Amino acid sequence: MTKRKTSRKKSAAPALPKTPICEITPEQQIVGALLLGKVTNYLPQIRVMTLLLEAPLAVGETIRVKGHTSDLTQRVERMQVDHQSVQSAVAGEAVGLEIADRVRPGDAVYKV
């Protein structure tokens, strides 16, 4: 008996879930800015927000957090992935960012 080789097509990596536009309220939308995701958690004691990235982000870039009562623009000074400081992160990674003011889970985060 001879073994026959079968060629398998490599499947593409599964696409990351994107935040549907219907989940972003009009007051959270910023025309022309790249949506990075939504705030998943905020720790007021240390002023850190967590975010599951939908696009790459690096230290030194400017972000804007927009929500029902939040509107904050600031430069990314420090970023952590799994409690390790990093200079950049890619889509799909959960990052912790120091933030200057209070934000709320569900606020939209943009790169501006």
Image (tube, rainbow, N blue to C red):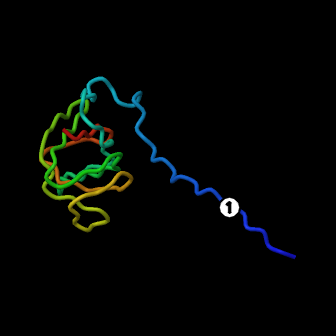
- Total number of numbered labels? 1
**Between residues 55 and 73, which one lies in front from this camera angle?**
55
Residue pushed farthest top?
26
Q: Secondary structure at mark 1?
A: loop
Question: Which amino acid, mark 1?
Answer: Ser
Q: Residues within 10 Å of mark 1 (few under 14, many from 20)?
A: few
Q: Position of residue 67 (x, y in %)?
A: 25, 33
Residue pushed farthest right?
1
**Between residues 13 and 93, which one lies in front from this camera angle?**
13
Q: Position of residue 8 (x, y in %)?
A: 66, 59
Tell me which residue sits at (26%, 49%) in the image: 42
Q: Position of residue 93 (x, y in %)?
A: 35, 56
Tell me which residue sits at (20%, 34%) in the image: 70
110 displayed left or right of 77: right
Tell me which residue sits at (32%, 46%) in the image: 55
Tell me which residue sits at (83%, 74%) in the image: 2
**Between residues 12 and 56, which one lies in front from this camera angle?**
12
Q: Position of residue 48 (x, y in %)?
A: 21, 54
Image quarter hosting the C terminus: top left
Q: Where on the picture, by quarter, is residue 103? A: top left
Q: Look at mark 1 in the image and give the residue it sits on.
A: 7
**Between residues 87 and 7, which one lies in front from this camera angle?**
7
Residue 15 vertical placement versus 94 (above, below): above
